[in-house]
Every structure is written in structure tokens, then in C-alpha cells.
Amino acid sequence: MRLSRFFLPVLRETPKEAEIISHQLMLRAGMVRQASAGIYSWLPLGLKVLQRIETIVREEQDRSGAIEMLMPTLQQADLWRESGRYDAYGPEMLRFRDRHEREMLYGPTNEELITQIFRDAVRSYRDLPRNLYHIQWKFRDEVRPRFGVMRGREFLMKDAYSFDINAAAARQAYHRMFVAYLRTFARMGLKSIPMAADTGPIGGDLSHEFIILAETGESRVYCHADLLDLRVPPADVDFAGDLAPLIEQWTKPYAATDEKHEDVRFAAEVPAEKRLSARGIEVGHIFFFGTKYSEPMGCRVQGPDGSMIAVQMGSYGIGVSRLVGAIIEASHDAAGIVWPVPVAPFEVALINLKAGDKDTDRACEDLYARLMRAGVSVLYEDTEERAGAKFASMDLIGLPFQLIVGPKGVKNGEVEVKERRSGERVNLAPDAAVKRLVELISARRLLV
Ligand code: 5CA
């Protein structure tokens, strides 16, 4: 992509309305613009990151055996009366009427709708287990939308729903999602810690939040420090096998959010030097709630003995749009964002220090074409801005690598490769620079 034809409205000043660094940087880097309180437009750079996150989420859901579908954002109130949640949900639910005076709502989550779809389609235990997911916008009229996309009113969520014949099978479904979540967040360069959590309006008695440690996190959390060093399950983990020992490894050490925290247990189970009390961002939340929806909504299947059995369900959410902010909270410096390669909007910023200079232009065009042929995604800074401004804005948007090309270097047969995270720079011949970038980037595309 040529910057001269892209849409990247960067801001020099830090917008006053933004309280936390990720929100400030997302506005400054031209990723989002607020449309109204807690509702954002995703500008091209922000959308690219959102889509890359979505892809990783999707790949790991698919790997674990979940099946993608798409449900609408708008739902009928009557459906929510079947589960009893229409009244229980409260003012966070956005309710309205259509032209026929039918009561409608903008979905804050989808347990009712998926239960209806499943109930109407499935008759026999032979059609179980299944896990269906979608990636769709949600609306919750939060009392205090804040921190940009981290606590929005409209936000993008991946929500999956599992259906099983009995509680033991449902627990295995829960385990599969648990492992998929560990891999999903690790692939984005994040260290996530699963923590025993409250279930709130979703319900059930087994639940984990996946938490990223960050000072600006909204949740206070407590855990055993060893959890930070546990190895994430590899790509070839056997989802058909018994995941219980793996889950045990991750759930045995103490880890709880504020609502579930017990000081006495924490002190008894964790040696003082391993007690970690910090703030965290909830990027995922999984629930096992048995027959909470299937029972009242009549979602039953015929069991092996012919009797009708209410299916055991769980639901599993990931805050896809929240993750964009969470990754920035975890990965930035004084100059701006530092994207991990797997979620970067582009992998390389190719910076032409003297656009309009024939030789420099020619060298840049050649590098641009070669990198793209090698499958690297490039933002080519080909504008007539001065060098200092180019460096500042490219550092701000945080692409993992910069390839800097100026007239002097071109004359000497040299270009500069800079790694954004470390600031390390090397001068190389153009050929060697391309080779080096391709190597570095391929090595970092897959983190786990
Ligand atoms: N139905 C269940 C699981 S599918 C559910 O709705 N769970 S949830 O309420 O915990 O939301 C799932 C994830 O969405 C959360 O872990 C969080 O990462 C994200 N999320 C929730 N509320 C917001 C919000 N207001 N803004 C941005 N992300 C949010």
C-alpha cells in the first residue's frame, strides 16, 4: 500500500478525551474515530488489525473443532422472554420497536438465539457434540463506556456455544475452548492467565476469565506467579484426546478475579514471593451453565435409551475489538505502538527519505515490488513529508520493521533495516535487506 493513496489521519497531539495509552495511540495512529459514546468507526489501519485478530481467533476456533456461522445483530424480544432474561438483563440491553410495533433488541449476546436454532434442528444425541460460533457486533448500553474500544457500547465479540449430551462431555467441550483460548492469545503475543471468575448475567457455576496483566486493566486479579511461565499447548495438541491433565496444570495454581478472590486461601496456597496481585484486562470469558437455557427453551434431544434429555451447554466469548486495545496496552513505548508481527497492520514500513529523487524512488519501487513478491505486507511511505515527520509517524503506527532508503545510502548501495521493538538498525545492501526482512518476519509470524 502506498501511503500517498492510503487513508491514515495521524494526530500529532494527544487527544484530551483519551485516558489510557491504548486509546490515545489508537486515535493518534488513525485507527479509530469515535462516532458517539462507546461507538467507533474503524479506519483502514484499525480495521486491518481487527481483521488479523479475527483471523487468529477463527483459525484456533476451527482447529479446536468449533464451526463458524453468523447470527444477526437484531433479535426479537419474545425469544428472550422464553429464557426469562428479557426482564433480567436490565438497562444494558438496547430495546426498540420496529414499524409493526414488534419489540426488538440489539443482541448483547446470543445464548437464546443459538438455543432456538439448535432446538429446531437437532433431535438425537447422535448429532452431539457440536460447538457453533460466530464473530459479530454486540451492543451493551454500558453505564460508563470508557477506555476507547476496551469498554465500548458497540463491540466485536467471538461467541461460541457448545451442546453436549451430559455434563462430562460438556466439560470436555469446555476444556477444548480453554486450550483454544490459551493458543489464541499467545499467537497475538499476549500472556493470558485463566482465572476462576463470576458468571454474572450469563449464569452457570463454572467459569474462567482470560486475563492479560496491565496496569490500566479494569479488574483486580490475584494469582500464582508461576502461571506466567507455563508453556502454551502446541498447534498439534490433540483436541480429541483427554485434555484434563493440561487443564489441571493451568487451573491448579491459584488464580482468581476480585469477585472470586479469597485472601485466606491465597495466603495458604501461594508462597509470599510468588503472590502476584495486579490489574488485568479480561480478553475472554468462558462459561459452563448446563441446562440454564436448554431447559426453559425446550432444547432436548433423544438419548440412547429413547428418553428426551435437555442438552448441556456452555458459552465462550472473546473480546475481538477489545483485543486491539489490550495488545497496545501490552506492547508500546514512548514513541508509539509496537505491533507483534502476527497482528501488525503491515509488516514493513518502507520509508523513502527523498520522494521525487529519481534514484531513491527507483530503489524504493524495486524494494517495494520485491518485498511484495516475497509475500511481505508493506506500507510504502512515498509522501513528500520531511524525514523527521516520517520517522515519527512510522514509529507511532508501530509496524514491526522499517526499511529506510535515502539518497546517500542509495549512492553507496546501502539501505537501513530497523526493528521497531529494539530500535536496532543495520545497513545492508538492498538484496541482503530483503532477505533479512523475509527471514525475520517469517520467524515471527507464528509465535506458538
Ligand atoms: N455469552 C458470553 C460468552 S459468549 C458472554 O457474553 N460473555 S462476556 O459477557 O464475558 O463477554 C465476552 C467478552 O467480550 C469479554 O470477555 C470481553 O473480552 C468482551 N466484552 C464484554 N463487554 C465488552 C465491552 N463493553 N466492550 C468491549 N468488549 C467487551
Image: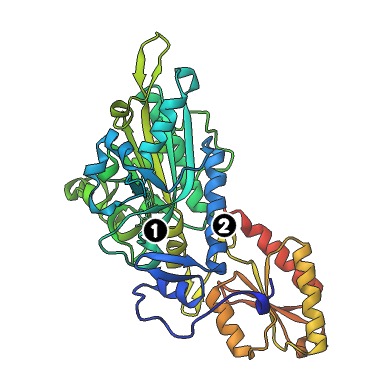
In the picture, measured across the screen, residue 199 lies left or right of residue 433, that is: left
Q: Which residue is mark 2?
A: 52
Q: Nearer the viewer, residue 272 or 378?
A: 378
In screen coordinates, is 320 left or right of 80? right
Crowding near the residue tagged with mark 2, few <14, some 14–19, many ≥20 C-alpha atoms within 10 Å: some
Residue bearing the label numbered 1: 154
Determine whether the residue tagged by mark 2 lies in a helix, strand or loop.
Answer: helix
34 up-or-down from 312: above or below: below
**Farthest left residue in view:** 264
Q: Quadrant of residue 381?
A: bottom right
**Given this view, does label 1 or label 2 mark the residue nearer the observer?**
1
Q: Amino acid at mark 1?
A: Glu
Point 52% across, 49% down: residue: 57
**In this view, 123 is above or below 38:** above
Front residue of this view, candidates 92 and 213: 92
Q: Is the residue under label 2 in contact with that under label 1 (CB below 8 Å)?
A: no
Q: Earlier in the sequence, mark 1 or mark 2?
A: 2
Of 432 and 123, the residue lying toward us: 123
Which residue is located at x 58 percent, y 58 percent?
342
Residue 277 is situated, as x and y percent measured from the top left of the image, at 28, 58
Report whether residue 88 is seen.
yes
Percent across and percent down for residue 244 are 42, 32
Residue 254 vs residue 24, the one in the foreground: 24
**Image location of residue 154, percent across then percent down:** 39, 58
150 relative position to 412: left or right: left
Is 367 positioned to the left or the right of 296 in the image? right
Q: Work out how far the residue at label 1 is from the one at label 2, CA to CA, in angstroms.
A: 19 Å
- Image point (57%, 57%), residue name: 52
**Above or below 85: residue 122:** above
Height in image: 182 above or below 366?
A: above
